[in-house]
Amino acid sequence: MSTPQLVVHRDKELMAQAAAARLITRIVDAQASTGSASVVLTGGRNGNGVLAALAAAPARDAIDWGRLDLWWGDERFLPEGDPERNVTQAREALLDSVPLDPERVHAMPASDGPHGADAEAAAEAYAQELARAAGPENHGAVPTFDVLMLGVGPDTHVASLFPEHPGVRETERTVIGVHGSPKPPPTRISLTLPAIRSAREVWLLAAGEDKANAVAMALSGAGEIQAPAAGAYGRARTLWLLDTPAASQLPRSLYPPASA
């Protein structure tokens, strides 16, 4: 378990731009070291903001897009192409504008895919896809992701792991179907905390005053059942990327003045 590090930016636009620059550097370094890179994307306004900032960054061309594997932390279990699906939004923000290898873009199944409306079967299929990509050097049944990004919800949820819901208590499976989500749509697919913790680096993104209480709760020692964001950490690094409003309920002692 890595100790959380905090970086606080002036506003959400600067946070997105800085996170995009940081992600470019991390991907390029991983590709230089091992020949490829593996990143888990997140949806929501902050995740999509980072992707849009990456699309606009001149340095994006430093990435070898053909040697990048993309995965998702969760997905809304809706038909292919639905505008609410994370992969649909990611394609619009970035993916359709860069030369990715389609075989290395690992979208979670849609509700009109081969598994139909069976979210459990779709989750198991994604778990098997992750397991096939895991090598002997990896820790468990998922690849060792270089960066896994997560948006933090106002209720402290990450991916589709919600406070007190069964999914946040899962200790064996890497991917689950989520039913009765308090945030629509009610049916989703999500990585579990064990899968999330396999990543080298976990980045938690939060911007806006509506996230301030969640950030403070997750970083104040709350348990992961009550605050799932508290249970999300990387093997080598856990990075909280915040804007000033999202950090407003944290004591200044938690982050250096230069961060702001």
Image (cartoon, rainbow, N blue to C red):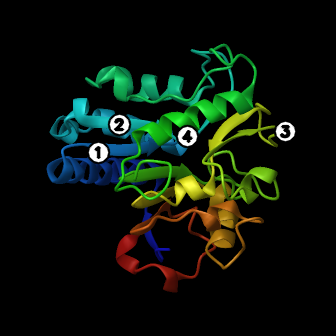
Q: Which mark is residue 45?
A: 4
Q: Is residue 13 above or below residue 212?
A: above
Question: Residue under circle 2?
Answer: 69
Q: Is residue 233 left or right of residue 186?
A: left
Real-space CA distance between mark 3 and mark 4, rounded to the nearest whole angstrom: 22 Å
Residue 155 in view: no
Of the image marks 3 and 1, the number of the one nearer the N terminus: 1
Mark 2 or mark 4, whichever is nearer to me:
2
Dot 4: element = helix
Q: Which residue is mark 1?
A: 37
Q: Give above or below for 169 relative to 76.
A: below
**Are the residues tagged 2 and 1 within 8 Å (C-beta)?**
yes
Which residue is located at x 72 percent, y 55 percent?
Answer: 170
x and y percent of residue 5 in the render? 44, 73
Q: CA distance from mark 2 to mark 3?
A: 30 Å
Q: Which quadrant of the view contains residue 6?
A: bottom left
In this rendering, the answer to whether 254 lies above or below 185 is below
